[in-house]
Amino acid sequence: MSITVLRREQSWLARLEGPVTIASAVELKALLVEWLATGKNLELDLENADEIDITCMQLLTAAARDAGAAGAGIVVRLSAAATAAVHDAGFDQMPAFKVQE
């Protein structure tokens, strides 16, 4: 997984590319913890993610839940592979996980 982050004044934009799997969970968690500390909104671009696994979906959902409690939000744009994984796992039904298609 490669991560590109644009830290803007009002929000962050993070682009994740390649496989977003348990192998990259530590790096993803570090990004999410850093972002949560800012209190800003996050646009998460997974359009170039080859795959996403349940571990990373759980991290994203927990971050979205924590952000919502703090008044921030997270919006996710997904690749076809990531969309299928999110739908198959039922994460698109969770209120904290806002998927933009």
Image (cartoon, rainbow, N blue to C red):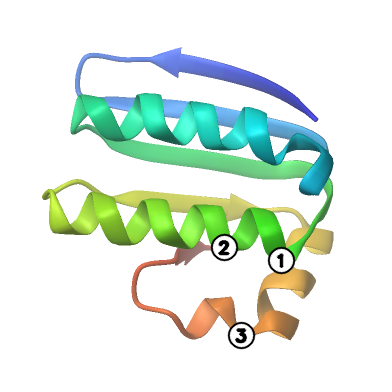
Does the rendering let one see residue 20? no
The residue lying at 66 percent from left, 53 percent from top is 56
Q: Quadrant of residue 27?
A: top right
Query: Dot 3 lies on which element?
Result: loop
Mark-to-mark CA distance, 3 and 1:
10 Å
Residue tagged 2? 58
Q: Quadrant of residue 57?
A: bottom right
Query: Dot 1 lies on which element?
Result: helix
Question: Quick check: 39 left or right of 17?
Answer: left
Residue 9, given in percent of the width and then of the height, sits at 21, 14
**Which is more foreground, mark 3 or mark 1?**
1
From this view, report whether residue 31 is shown above or below residue 44. above
Amino acid at dot 1: Ile
Amino acid at dot 3: Gly
Residue tagged 1? 54
Does the rendering let one see residue 15? yes
Residue 24, given in percent of the width and then of the height, sits at 76, 36
In this rendered view, identify the residue nearer to me: 10 or 1.
1
How many other residues sit within 10 Å of disc 3, few (<14), some (14-19) or many (≥20)? few
Amino acid at dot 2: Gln
Name the quadrant of the N terminus: top right
Please tell me which of labels 2 and 3 falls first in the chain. Answer: 2
Residue tagged 3? 90
In this rendered view, identify the residue nearer to me: 36 or 50.
36
The residue lying at 34 percent from left, 77 percent from top is 95
How many other residues sit within 10 Å of disc 1, few (<14), some (14-19) or many (≥20)? some
In this rendered view, identify the residue nearer to me: 40 or 70.
70
